[in-house]
Image: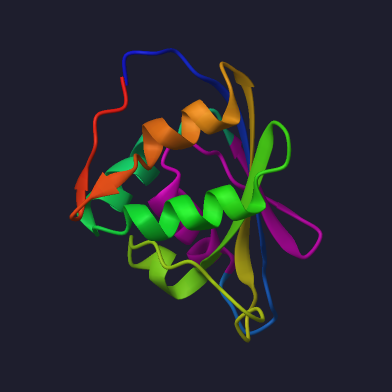
Amino acid sequence: MSTVYSVDVRVTAPVHDTEVTDRVADAVTNIFPTADPSYEGDQIVAACHDMSHVSELLHREEILDTARGVFLDTLDDDAFTFELNKQAAFEGRINFSVGGPAELGDIHVRVRVTEPSAEAFIDAIAPPTEDGAPIDTE
């Protein structure tokens, strides 16, 4: 990514009585390694300004089209949101939650892009594909 992006990523995840708080925090940092999670109330809260690891995982797991669909479906002006399965995140994998939340809740992510645009940022982290291969949009 040669363009400089200005993004604010906010991550929240509920912590239930049956869960170990550190494991939920690990699930968050496995996907967002630059985040610094803290325990607030009954949830983990974290923030960061980087989604390069998310992009690497999307490429590695070959789920760019799925990610683009999720990101674009929730795009609202300068922000988009998505939910991740906690167990998959704990294992360092991205698995988008669809439908109702998992029994222990999901990791909720809100990404706000101030430079240059949310659409351009989505193109950078989850580029369009053709026959499963990323298309260079620049």
Q: Say whether residue 129 is left or right of residue 43.
A: left
Q: Where is residue 25 in the image (x, y as percent from the top left)?
A: 53, 57
| Above or below 112: residue 100 | below
Quadrant containing the N terminus in the rendered view: top left
| Above or below 33: residue 21 | below
Q: Of 94 and 124, which appears nearest the observer?
A: 124
Does any portion of residue 130 appear in the rendered image? Answer: yes
| Above or below 62: residue 90 | below
| Residue 31 falls inside the magenta stretch | yes
Q: Which residue is drawn at 50% across and 18% down?
A: 5
Q: Residue at x 39, y 13 (%)?
A: 3
Q: Of 79 and 89, which appears nearest the observer?
A: 79
Q: Say whether residue 49 is left or right of residue 129.
A: right
Q: Residue at x 33, y 67 (%)?
A: 91
Farthest residue toward the right?
41
Range of residues picked out in magenta: 21-47
Q: Tell me the colour scheme of the image.
A: rainbow
Q: Residue at x 38, y 31 (%)?
A: 124
Q: Position of residue 29 (x, y in %)?
A: 45, 49
Counting the numbered discs, the total is 0
